[in-house]
Amino acid sequence: MKRIGVIGTGYVGLVTGTCLSDFGLNVICVDNDSKKIKAINEGIIPIHEPGLEPIVERNVYYKRLHFTTDMKDTVETSEVLFIAVGTPPADDGSADLQYIEAVARDIGRHMNGYKVIVDKSTVPIGTGQRVKGWVQEELEKRKAVYDFDVVSNPEFLREGSAVYDFTHPDRIVIGAETDKAIEMMKRVYNVLYLNETPFLETNIETAEMIKYSSNAFLAMKITYINEIANLCEKVGANVQDVAKAMGRDGRISPKFLHPGPGYGGSCFPKDTLALAETGKKYGAPITLIEQTVKANEYQKKLMVDKIEREMKGLEGKQLAILGLSFKPNTNDMREAPSITILNELAQGGAKFRVYDPIAYDEAKWRLKSIEDKITYCENEYETMKDSDAIVIITEWNQFRNLDMERVKSLLKHPYFFDLRNIYRRDSMEKQGFQYFGVGQGSRKGN
Ligand code: NAD
């Protein structure tokens, strides 16, 4: 097989290109962000993703992995082209396809022979056909005739474990219209195919639908347990026990049953919005997902209300904030609950001493509007000095074993808001904290 081109060198593109090169394929990753490509070529990996750096290094060393800004060369020298650019929400919630269109047109402009064009970005149902149209239009402008296939091959990796997920997927979904394209995709994923990863072959529209339905379902599952948690608080039940017992039911599974401050990140918020918009557009509303979007916004607000209520106001209060990234093991803060929560707490008059192990570069621009209220600290204990309360927003492992005597000696008041339920209420209360988890309503039997 000739080269694989990966267009867009972000979380998905960089991991895809790197892991494919580690499968022994010759890969070129292209991005129009020249600073990013320069940095990678100097050995600086722009994202924090466990295990990624040595694999990049190794494959660059063996000359199987290349990084460039040269789209023309990438298209001309590659047989399979993965599109892995962003698909952020437009103002109405639908996916903004401007980056996908730009790439599709670029491919059409530079195409010099048969290509398989693979949508790896999460794109609304029908985008594969539009990509085909954009490429064809550019070919016609050039009066060029080349055969090509468009494939939908959605990505299911999770940030924080992206390398593992890419190399150990639950399934590979291939939506295609020709046997030739399916065969090419099997060659790309040969290593996984030989390892008996389930391959699901279907049409393009179904593959696109699989990605949205999966993500929206997971977002809905989180939202469901969040709402159950809120009810638990009112009726004196403990959601941790509820979730544990529910999860034992094989039909339910224990995953994504952890209540918290609402889901965030670069995928669930935009994919739920986009699916809801697609449903409305086609007159087949997905009302559960429309409600999920609203309930998730409300969940973040509930966290702020709880802190304000229990502390009897926020004016002049200093909060020790642990964790800013949208989840542990990533520096990604796109749609992180911390952004909404800190902004709203700041509006109420609070100021913050914060700590996150790796998200400061992101945090400093995403929280710029309230920067005068934030002190960035070097470790978790520094945040607590003279603070009125501690608020755990992201469950980094290192926050799971805090020295509680030290915490108490540093805090001005023993308010402990654990928005990820990494501690148990009864044990924290015994240690003298005024502890508030999410859905830990019961004082007994924990
Ligand atoms: P990202 O923002 O990290 O990366 C996108 C990259 O594309 C950027 O580096 C950008 O500079 C580049 N780009 C934009 N336009 C370009 C162009 N015309 N030519 C070349 N490069 C261009 O985004 P991401 O998180 O990697 O997400 C990419 C897609 O994958 C999205 O559709 C997303 O929904 C989907 N996805 C993301 C994840 C995730 O965990 N991040 C998981 C599964 C699927």
Image: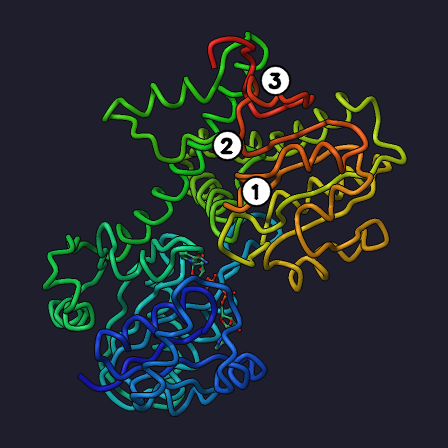
* Residue 392 in picture, x, y percent from top left: 62, 38
Q: What amino acid type is highlighted by mark number 1?
A: Phe
3 or 2: mark nearer the eye: 3
* Residue 152 in picture, x, y percent from top left: 29, 61
Between the C-alphas of marks 3 and 2, the distance is: 36 Å
Q: What amino acid type is highlighted by mark number 2?
A: Thr
Q: Is mark 2 within 8 Å of ligand 1?
A: no
Left or right: 5 as drawn, with respect to 160: left
Q: What amino acid type is highlighted by mark number 3?
A: Lys
Task: Give me the disc on residue 399.
Answer: 1
Mark positioned earlier in the residue sequence (2 or 1):
2
Between the C-alphas of marks 3 and 1, the distance is: 19 Å
Left or right: 203 as drawn, with respect to 240: left
- Of 436 and 193, which appears nearest the observer? 436
* Residue 115 in picture, x, y percent from top left: 25, 80
Quarter of the image where one finds residue 169: bottom left
- 437 above or below 109? above
Residue at 59 percent across and 39 percent down: it is 402
Residue at 62 percent across and 30 percent down: it is 298
Residue at 48 percent across and 86 percent down: it is 41
Describe the element under mark 1 as helix, strand or loop. Answer: helix
Q: Which residue is mark 3?
A: 430
Mark positioned earlier in the residue sequence (3 or 1):
1
- 352 above or below 43? above
- Of 255 and 125, which appears nearest the observer? 255
2 or 1: mark nearer the eye: 1
User: 10 Å neighbourhood of mark 1: few (<14), some, or many (≥20)?
Assistant: some
Q: Is mark 3 within 8 Å of ligand 1?
A: no
Task: Give me the disc on residue 292.
Answer: 2
